[in-house]
Amino acid sequence: MNVSTGTPQPRLPAQAPARSGPPLRILSLAPTSFFGDYGCHVRILEEARALKAHGHQVTILTYFKGQDVPGFRIIRTAPTPWRANYEVGSSRHKFAFDALLSVRLLRVLARNRFDLIHAHLHEGALIGSVLGKPWDIPVCFDYQGSLTDEMTQHGFMRSDNPLALRFWRWVEGLANRLPDAIFTSTLRAAEVLRAELGPRKPIYPLVDAVNTDAFRPDVLSPADRAALRAAWGIGESETVIVFLGLLARHQGIEHIIDAAARLKSQGQQARWLVMGYPGVEHWRQLAAGRGVSQEIVFTGRVPYPDAPRMLALGDIAIAPKLSLTEGSGKVLNYMAMGLPTVAYDTPGQAQYLGNLGLYAEVGNQEQLAARVAELINQPQRRRDIGRLLRERAEQSFSWRKTGLLLAGYYQQMLDRRSRRPISQSDTVHNTTYEHDHI
């Protein structure tokens, strides 16, 4: 039985360019509080690890706050004098943080030599493209979603303010046009940008990947799994639905709470393990108001190294992300853990799950709950889907392969910049994956 909704499956890059070139000195420009145990930061970290594994040198320039990562040179800005501690997400304070990042970037470029700047987020693309010009450093932009969409979803800007929307769309367009090349975390984003920017701008789909050595189904023994469940007040035989990520509205946290309430009213027995930050107390209060405070466990922040063990407590994963332009790297973690996944049918999530996802129409909370109920009542089906998702993650979404692909894209970008013709062997080959059906 086909578990998908019939959404056409996208074409994914199947292999890296044949030549990735000599070792490069890369400045990863990250206008965020790296490292912070959530999706955007995981992509930055795993890209850096994959590049390092292929012999490249990566320096990370980021905001003042964040966790250091062993094995990498991380350069930080000075803190703002009025607010050294701040939460993740859109904030007007980011204008000051980006000004400090710009100052720090100028100092770093004056004292160090780099072959290229790998800029993350639109702020990084703007800052890197403008300030890198005196040093003639090529800039690639790691595009993870629409800037204006993110600002409205995070409540930073009202969607009914046409002047603000027009201004920020212009800023977003400028950030898209300035870099030498763009890497997109979803295939849909690559298609949209190609339509916007035309054929002359190099746009490479670099979909998220997963560390399949760290995220694996057998990370906990049965005894350790039972003990860790008990530590969180969860019984060994209870069916557990897990979510791990940023606790933001566009991630669909309210929809998880609604699904828990719907299933409880229908007599379905299940527990929900919602892992992440910020705003944990707000979501706890909302769950209590819906009468599901006993069913939902909010763990708070989970350090990235602990994520596999915590995900191993689940039987089902849920991904109700509402954004149609952003990727959803957490889904790959679920897949590598062998967790059958219920998700909203967005391009970013469908490209990972393929025909193995159980989809609900975006925003349809009743359908989302119904899909979870299907899996609660079919344990053998859960195991079958989980096994195939694990295989799919290993075969198609390993960071080891993505590191070589990324290095090849760098070389293509540098070749274009030097106006040296690109040989046939440098082109990126695509293929269509054949998906298993349950």
Image: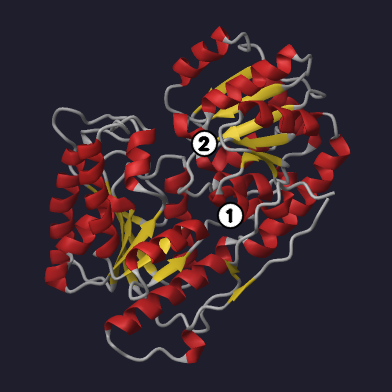
Question: Is disc 1 in contact with disc 2, using a CB cutoff of under 8 Å?
Answer: no
Residue 38 image point, x, y percent: 46, 40
Task: Measure how far apart labels 1 and 2 are at the Cα level.
Answer: 15 Å
In the displayed structure, 352 sits above or below 15; it is: above
Q: Quadrant of residue 257?
A: top right
Residue at left offset 24%, top offset 64%: 178
Q: Quadrant of residue 166?
A: top left
Mark identifier at residue 245: 2
Question: Looking at numbered disc 1 in the image, what kind of residue is underneath it?
Answer: Val
In the shown orientation, is residue 233 left or right of residue 126? right
Mark identifier at residue 381: none
Residue at left offset 79%, top offset 47%: 385
Residue at left offset 30%, top offset 31%: 160
In the displayed structure, 137 sits above or below 95; it is: below
* Residue at the limit of the structure toward the right, as seen here: 380
Element under disc 1: loop
Element under disc 2: loop
Residue 64 image point, x, y percent: 25, 41
Mark identifier at residue 210: 1
Which class describes the residues within 10 Å of circle 1: few (<14), some (14-19), or many (20+)?
many
Depth check: 222 or 298 in front?
298
Question: Looking at numbered disc 2 in the image, what kind of residue is underneath it?
Answer: Gly
Q: How many marks?
A: 2
Residue 270 image point, x, y percent: 74, 21
